[in-house]
Amino acid sequence: MKFSLDNLNHYYSRFLQEMAFRTGGSFGKPTSVIVLLTNRCNARCVHCYSWKIQSENSEMTTDKWKRTFDELRRWLGPVFISITGGETLLRKDSVQLAKHAAQLGLWVEFLINGYLMTTELTDKLIQSGVKRIKVSLDGSKPEIHDKIRGRNGFFLKATQTLKNLAEEKSRQKRDVRIWGKTALMSLNMEDLPNIVRLAHQLGIDGVEFQALEPTYYSEKLRDPRWYENNPLWITNPDKLSEIIRQLRELKTQGDPIINTIENLNMIENYFHAPEQLAYKVHSHDYRKKTQQCRAWVGGLQIMPDGGMKMCHWMKPFANARDGNLRQAWEKKEQCWKKSCSYIGEEIT
């Protein structure tokens, strides 16, 4: 691998995170940032209540977001930025903001559900310089995908969007990855191999499976036993094991599954022992050697109103509107796992 200043910045940041973790210090800095441009959404997903939040009047302006990206680049270097929502495209300036972040040298991921994508937006997004585009793909047919999305017509829009993005990427010869993203739950468990085959037919780079989490923006978010009596939870371990086996086999054969074999195994184990593996699934940190939640030394989320968090379960410790992101980060309250309302003491 060719070494660069970007590599040096990343490993230096990881070193600071490790030292902060070992000492309880506040000198670490994030190596990635999740940016939620809006909570508004045109879907009614069964596993997310983002659409219930009326946030348009409190969202940061285009200029404020651009200044925030500018400051993130100066502070963190060319780090990974995931731009998401709600439905990201409900912000009319979302592609413009993604382009601004990419032009700064940030490594930009852009997440959408595909329903609002037009030919013009497809062209602009592929040209923008983002490195990865994810489109929600929760089933291989309308009966499943639309049921999970809570509205009819989303399957046709999502699959057409993925196909168009793949074709436009090829036409423009752009270095951008096009992924489907699947929330794995009881409603689509048996359909997962078919989703992989659909991804191949659409010509996209792959599909990523993400295990079910507590319903976002609901009273269950901070309940460690949220999965009990949840109709979306997978309660047939033998059937799940068989599906995961099929996915491992498909991946071994070269089918477009983004998850590693280790990650697929971890997802299987998570549905067997959710409280023991919650810190990995809900922080999206699937690294094998990570035995404790490290969001407090490396996680940063910026909410639509500018609120800065280390993870989805904590209250904001500062606001990006005020600037001085680095100072806010270094002065934040320490977040030890024993005080976490979600994880508690399960992983000590």
Image (tube, helix red, strand yellow):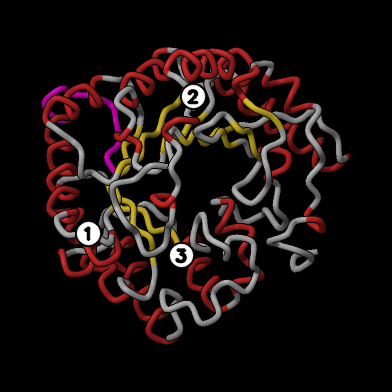
- The residue indicated by pointer 2 is 60
> CB of mark 1 within 8 Å of CB of mark 2?
no
Image location (x, y in percent) of residue 338? 82, 58
> CB of mark 1 within 8 Å of CB of mark 3?
no
- The residue indicated by pointer 3 is 212
Above or below, comparing residue 105 to residue 294 in the picture:
above
Q: Earlier in the sequence, mark 1 or mark 2?
A: 2
Image location (x, y in percent) of residue 263? 49, 60
Image location (x, y in percent) of residue 198? 17, 58
Total label count?
A: 3
Asked whether 175 falls inside the magenta stretch, the response is yes
For the residues carrying marks 3 and 2, which lies nearer the camera in this image?
A: 2
Q: Earlier in the sequence, mark 1 or mark 3?
A: 1
Q: Earlier in the sequence, mark 3 or mark 2?
A: 2
What crowding class fits label 2: few (fewer than 14 Cα within 10 Å), some (14-19), or many (20 or more)? many
For the residues carrying marks 1 and 3, which lies nearer the camera in this image?
A: 1
| Left or right placement of residue 306 versus residue 336 in this view | left
Asked whether 138 falls inside the magenta stretch, the response is no
Q: Quadrant of the C terminus?
A: bottom right
- The residue indicated by pointer 1 is 151
Q: Which residues are magenta?
A: 170-179
Q: Say which of 26 and 55 sits in front.
A: 55
Which amino acid does the dot numbered 3 rest on?
Leu
User: Which of the 4 quarters of the picture holds residue 57?
Assistant: top left
Disc 3 from disc 2: Cα separation: 29 Å
Q: Secondary structure at mark 1?
A: loop
Which amino acid does the dot numbered 2 rest on?
Met
Q: Say which of 250 and 22 sits in front.
A: 22
Residue at (19%, 61%) from the top-left corner? 197
Image location (x, y in percent) of residue 64? 50, 16
User: Which of the 4 quarters of the picture holds residue 339?
Assistant: bottom right
